[in-house]
Amino acid sequence: MSPHILEMRSISKTFPGVKALDNVSFQVAEGEIHCLVGENGAGKSTLMKVLSGVHSHGTYTGDILFRGEVQSFRGISDSEHAGIAIIYQELALFPELSVYENILMGQEITHGLGVTVDWNETVKKATEMLKRVGLKVNPEALIKDLGIGQQQLVEIAKALCKNVKLLILDEPTAALNEDDAENLLLLIKDLQKNGITSVLISHRLKEVIEIADTVTVLRDGKTICTLDARKGQVSESVLIKNMVGREIHKIYPARGNCVTDEVVLDVRNWNAYSPKLGRAVLKDIQFNLHKGEIIGFAGLMGSGRTELAKSLFGNPDGYELRGEMTFHQQKKRFKHPGEAIQAGLAYASEDRKGNGLILIQDIKSNITLANLEKVSNRGILDANREVKEANDYKNALKIKTPSVEQTVVNLSGGNQQKVSIAKWLFVEPKILILDEPSRGIDVGAKYEIYTIMNRLVEQGMSIIMISSELPEVLGMSDRIYVVSAGRIAGELSREEADQEKIMHLATS
């Protein structure tokens, strides 16, 4: 019998105008943790969708061998029946249902003639699965009341219920803080000890190096190489070189000192109370921002960083606000995002798919959406001008797409992020808030976004960057504010900041 639980041979997949996979082949040994890496748009997620049956047999060319047998999956149910489970970055859970209902969804335990659900046994089985993944929550709790790290574990528990042999995880740690991400990696190693093979797609190269037995690199829809970590073949520099086709010696590009003495934003005694949550989410926040400066906001998930950004940007969540904000020497409190945009404040959401972009529309429509007046004549959209402006941003930000007419949902995560940034640059802001600017994107796209950020501040813009990645905060910020439990726990200069000091303040 073959030592490989999975073989994908000469897989090619084409979408209109794009060849997503070009003769891709790779093998996964039984019982190993195999990481799949590559730039956004390299074909990783498409390859896994082929494997899981999302792209059904007949829509691609090539062969899938699972446990030595050629497979013809027509849908996800076929691959799950064979023992393959896939967990996407966007979790497929029902927020209004309980944990146990989600875990046993589609495989409910019944009695009698199979018509009535045996809820006692269902809860008992769900509890066993929760114990197996190390999640200590009430199985009757609603999914919407769990943190994102806990929801991720519910997804894995759900997969284990299906007697999974091969577990595919697509960017499982992208939205997790460092502690939750580390716990998830430990769980994957524990599953390996119990005979479960895992394929992990990740842009976090340090976690790839930490967990992988083997790594396959894709670039431009092609297999570049497979590296054996057990033979010392895997390092960050080797992965980057194979992913992007060139060496990137310094992921955070150098920036000259362009910070001026001019204070463009000054926030004092800023408080926000959430009627929905019934508690204060921000308490006596004070900070300032200079022209040409990048300030980083660090902190644990739920510390209040995003709440702060939204409260400044027109308060779309309806917080009860107290305090003062001076925006370019004028006292301001924006009543809705439209006012903030008019004044020159833009906010690129951490949730680009939910709040940042309209996925079913094309690139040009998304880029111009927040400033339609700029491409209109007496209230009528000038289609030619819209295409020209969108193409200018496509070229400037190196958005990989055959056309600005391409639907945004068909772009890779990194290119979607560039469209989101282009949308806010199009309103010509004085201050740009970037909430998790590199979440779920590859090292090459990160470097390009960092380069764009540097160019913007050199041109006189000011940037507030919220990030859960401490190396990113340290590498890109002129000053760092650490948020803990809705308060500013401390301010650090670029020279004095390090990961230990930030974490000490974040957990204080």
Image (cartoon, rainbow, N blue to C red):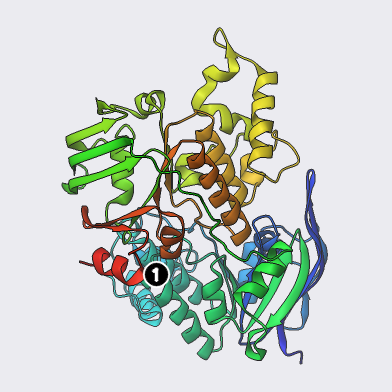
Q: Nearer the viewer, residue 107 or 436?
A: 436
- Res 27 seen here: no
Q: Can you identify the residue that label 1 sits on?
A: 178
Instruction: Indicate the position of residue 91 as horizontal and vertical percent values.
Output: 48, 59
The image shows residue 217, relative to residue 428, as above or below, that is below
Q: How many marks?
A: 1
Instruction: Indicate the position of residue 288 as horizontal and vertical percent values.
Output: 28, 42
Q: Residue at x 31, y 51 (%)?
A: 305
Q: Quadrant of residue 50?
A: bottom right
Q: Using a 10 Å C-alpha cutoff, classify the residue at mark 1 as few (fewer than 14 neighbours), some (14 to 19) or many (20 or more).
A: some
Instruction: Indicate the position of residue 375 as horizontal and vertical percent values.
Output: 59, 19
Instruction: Indicate the position of residue 229 as horizontal and vertical percent values.
Output: 63, 85
The amino acid marked with disc number 1 is Glu
Q: Residue at x 24, y 65 (%)?
A: 505
Q: Nearer the viewer, residue 94 or 236?
A: 236
Helix, strand or loop under label 1: helix
Quarter holding the C terminus? bottom left
The image shows residue 332, relative to residue 435, as above or below, that is above
Q: Residue at x 73, y 90 (%)?
A: 3
Q: Nearer the viewer, residue 121 or 31?
A: 31
